[in-house]
Image (cartoon, helix red, strand yellow):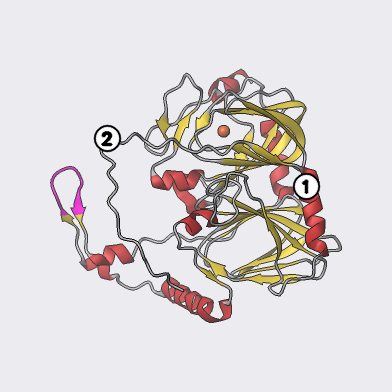
Amino acid sequence: MQKHVTGLVQLVDVSGARPRAQTVWPTVVLPKSAIEAEIERLADILRPSNGVRASAVNHPMNTGPVPAYAPGIAVHMQVLKPGEEVEVGMRNSSLVDMCIRGTGGVKVGGKQFAVEKFDVWNTPSMETQIYRNDGSDLFVRLSYSNAPLLERLEVHYVDDEPASTGKKYTEAAEASAAGAGPRARDVAKPIVIGRDGAQMLGYEWLVDIDTVDSQPLLWPWKEVSPHLENVHAMDLGYTGRHLYVLYNPATGRRIGTSHSFFATIAKVPAGKVDRPHRHSSAAINYIMWGHGKSVVNGEKIQWEEGDLHFSAPGWSVHNHASREQGLMALTIQDHPLHIAMESLLWQETLKDPILKLGSNRGPDTNLNTLRKAA
Ligand SMILES: [Fe+2]
């Protein structure tokens, strides 16, 4: 229902106005015990009519319009009991998921795969999704979505009846994939303006954009985990991070797992202390194993296996440290989104310059020196 606008459009005098101070969401930890208790509670409720047993993690500073753990990142715990199956409608938000308990079947669009603990996969926008618990334990996944930003923009398209409009979308998508004929934009020749690269383009260029094949991809833990030994074995003096990005080639130079988020899995040796740094992307860490501590905006915080840590509010100085066990963690950051917006500011150490990654060359690590010494 469209609301009637009752007030007048106002003009706000911003002449000479100072920049607005940003509201920093403090670092917080959702402990494993709270996650486990919520999973059990979701398993005990009467099955909702849409089949979705889920809880959204909400940061205490969030002002909505939907629950979110970082301003642009939602984290939902999705639970299915043995034998349950749920179909989720199409939406223009996209997901990165990690299975944290049990086993299940996942069908995204026309692709299906089985998942188990610590498997990670991405779900492109506008795909039908079916999840099935074919095991004997609860099937639980942490699902990270860029929906909070779309909700803030008031353009989160959600179709819970994929059999109707969703089907029309799918048919149109298939037809466009099949259409390899000449494009109208090919005859709408660019007009060069001046000598610095400015151009004028016809409408055809606006609506017929070069496409990128966007697929659901799976990173099975069985295949990922042996490679983590490489980063785990690296010298404590390594100035980079002991991790791998789960890279989806559809994201190209923006090095993402989905078009909005990257997922990394770190395996950090014991006694590692990162240097304080900051970035405009926000970060959420799920501690898969081990324990450690962080200093974020001057605030000390500890975390351990099974905790969900809002570990880096955008542009907050922070560093993380492992303790005597080392640790493994899944980190989700809205880094590719920022690269697309030309807003990814990065300061590798507080002595280094502020860089705009994607436009400025990024910082080097000492990887070359370490490789030569090995
Ligand atoms: Fe960071």
Where residue 250 sits: x, y (%)?
Answer: 49, 54
Q: Relative to 283, is 16 on the left or the right?
A: left
Looking at this view, name the residue that lies furthest to the left: 194
Place residue 31 in its image quadrant. Answer: top right
Where residue 114 sits: x, y (%)?
Answer: 73, 62
Reply above or below: 136 against 228. below
Residue 181 belongs to magenta span: no
Residue indicated by mark 2: 16
Where residue 165 sits: x, y (%)?
Answer: 50, 78
- In the rendered structure, find residue 175 and report the number of the disc placed on it: none
Q: Which residues are magenta?
A: 192-199
Residue indicated by mark 1: 34
Q: CA distance from mark 1 to mark 2?
A: 47 Å
Where residue 305 sits: x, y (%)?
Answer: 77, 39
Name the residue: 53% across, 49% down.
72
Is the residue marked by circle 1 packed among few (<14), some (14-19), or many (20+) residues within 10 Å? Answer: few
Residue type indicated by callout 2 = Gly
Mark 2 close to ligand 1, CB under 8 Å = no
Rendering quadrant holding ligand 1: top right
Judging depth in this view, the residue of 102 and 38 nearest the camera is: 38
Place residue 229 in its image quadrant. Answer: top right
Tell which tag, 1 or 2, sits nearer the viewer.
Answer: 2
Query: Helix, strand, or loop for circle 2?
Result: loop
Reply above or below: 176 against 259. below
Name the residue: 68% across, 33% down.
230
Residue type indicated by callout 1 = Ala
Kindly check if marks 1 and 2 are in contact, taking CB atoms under 8 A apart as contact: no
Reply above or below: 120 against 161. above
Name the residue: 52% across, 63% down.
125
Quarter of the image for the C terminus: give it: top right
Judging depth in this view, the residue of 9 and 236 nearest the camera is: 9
